[in-house]
Structure formats: C-alpha cells, structure tokens
Amino acid sequence: SSRVSLFAERTCSLVNREQVRSANKETLLEIINNENLGEEQKQDAVNSMVNMTNLAEQEEAAELLLEAQGFSNIVVNLTGDSADVIVPKEYMEDARRAQIEDIVKRKTSVPAENIVITPLEGESEEKTSP
C-alpha cells in the first residue's frame, strides 16, 4: 500500500537525519575534548552543539503539532533560517500547504518565504509568493 511506502520513506528520512546529527555531534565532542585546541574553537563547537539541539527540538515540535492537526508522515528539516518540509502529495493543495506553513512558522520562527514544502513523491514545488 502507498501508506506503507510513505511511512517507510518518512522513517528513512528521520533515520538519515539522526545519523547525520549523531556524526556531527561526535565530531563536535572530539573538538570539545581535544586538549590541543584553544578555548575559542571549543566554545564554537559547544555553540554548534547547542544550535543543533535547538533545531532538533523545533523540528520535533513542528512535526508533533502537524501530526496532532491530522497531518501524518511529514518531515521537517531545519537548516539555519530555512525549513524544508517533506509531505505526502495529498497535502500539496493550497489550503493544506498554508496550514502546514503556518504551523512550521509558529514552531520554528522560520519566515514563510524560507519554508519550502516538497511532496514525498515527484518533483519539488517551491512556494510561490502572492
């Protein structure tokens, strides 16, 4: 069924995201624990870890609220001041996209113009401003 494949794709996206974060965290911990590096480099690594944790918490908050509002199988991926939101194709209609965008905006503080909503299957559809 397509529901199973959507769930599998979402799970794969989440696992990949966590693997990348885990590798980044490991690298940052090595920097923090390296006695040969200066305090400034160590502080930069600590700041990066804090930022990574904040982004992860915002992604999870957005995904949980989306799910509570009836939107399932959505992945929110934050990078700095932008958000990539991967959704099942049936959520690509304007009214649902507007709801998704509003929730992501509220939970992440990413401005609407920096939120890109992409269908799980098929071509990417950039948000177009009115």
Image: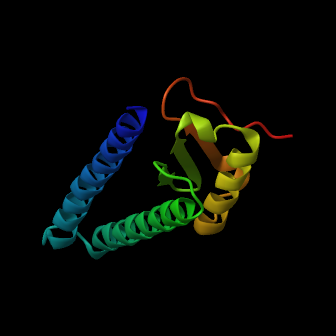
Residue 18 coordinates in the image, percent (x, y)? 29, 54
Q: Residue at point 75% right, 41% down? A: 94
Q: Is residue 96 above or below residue 105?
A: above
Q: Residue at point 54% right, 65% down? A: 68
Task: For the N terminus, give its image quadrant.
Answer: top left
Asked if residue 118 lies left or right of residue 28, the reply is right
Residue 28 coordinates in the image, percent (x, y)? 25, 63
Q: Residue at point 36% right, 68% down? A: 44
Total marks drawn?
Answer: 0
Question: Residue furthest toward the top?
Answer: 123
Q: Residue at point 29% right, 45% down? A: 16
Asked if residue 126 lies left or right of residue 84, the reply is right
Q: Is residue 73 above or below residue 38?
A: above
Asked if residue 61 lies left or right of residue 26, the reply is right
Residue closest to the eye, 67 or 52: 67
Task: For the C terminus, give its image quadrant.
Answer: top right
Residue closest to the eye, 83 or 61: 61
Residue 103 coordinates in the image, percent (x, y)? 64, 61
Give the color scheme: rainbow, by chain, secondary structure or one colour.
rainbow
Question: Residue furthest toward the front?
Answer: 1
Question: Residue furthest toward the right?
Answer: 130
- Res 81 quadrant in image: bottom right
Residue 6 coordinates in the image, percent (x, y)? 41, 38
